[in-house]
Image (spheres, rainbow, N blue to C red):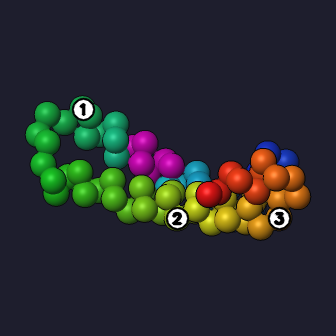
Amino acid sequence: MRRGRRPRTDRLRGGYLMWGGWLLTTAVVLSVVDIPHTAYVAGLAPALAALAAAGAVTLWRAHRTATSAPARLLLP
């Protein structure tokens, strides 16, 4: 499921951009701060969970609609 030519109002692309931006911003801020603490690193968890779930759903949909054998083996 490629998202390259979808309109800018595509919800899946927007979700990837939002959660990816959250993850990138939080990672950059935490790499600049010299105080590693689990409470700060917990800010990465929502973005990582959302991106992992969205990736799993995207792979599942690609697996279900695939017609060739190599593409069907992508998910397992």
Label 2: state its secondary structure: helix
Q: Which portion, as a residue range, is magenta?
A: 20-25
Give the mark nearer the N terminus: 3 vs 2. Answer: 2
Q: Identify the residue position indicated by label 1 in the image.
A: 32
Q: In the image, 27: left or right of 21? A: left
The 10 Å Cα crowd at callout 2, few under 14, some 14 to 19, many 20 or more, is few
Q: Identify the residue position indicated by label 3 in the image.
A: 65
Q: Position of residue 56 (x, y in %)?
A: 58, 62
Task: Mark 3 and mark 1 in contact? Answer it, CB < 8 Å.
Answer: no
The answer to whether residue 18 is above or below residue 36 is below
**Residue displayed at 39% across by 43% down:** 25
Q: Is residue 37 magenta?
A: no
**Residue displayed at 62% across by 57% down:** 76
**Residue displayed at 14% across by 42% down:** 36
Q: Position of residue 44 (x, y in %)?
A: 33, 53
Say what amino acid the circle numbered 2 marks: Ala
Q: In the image, 51: left or right of 71? A: left
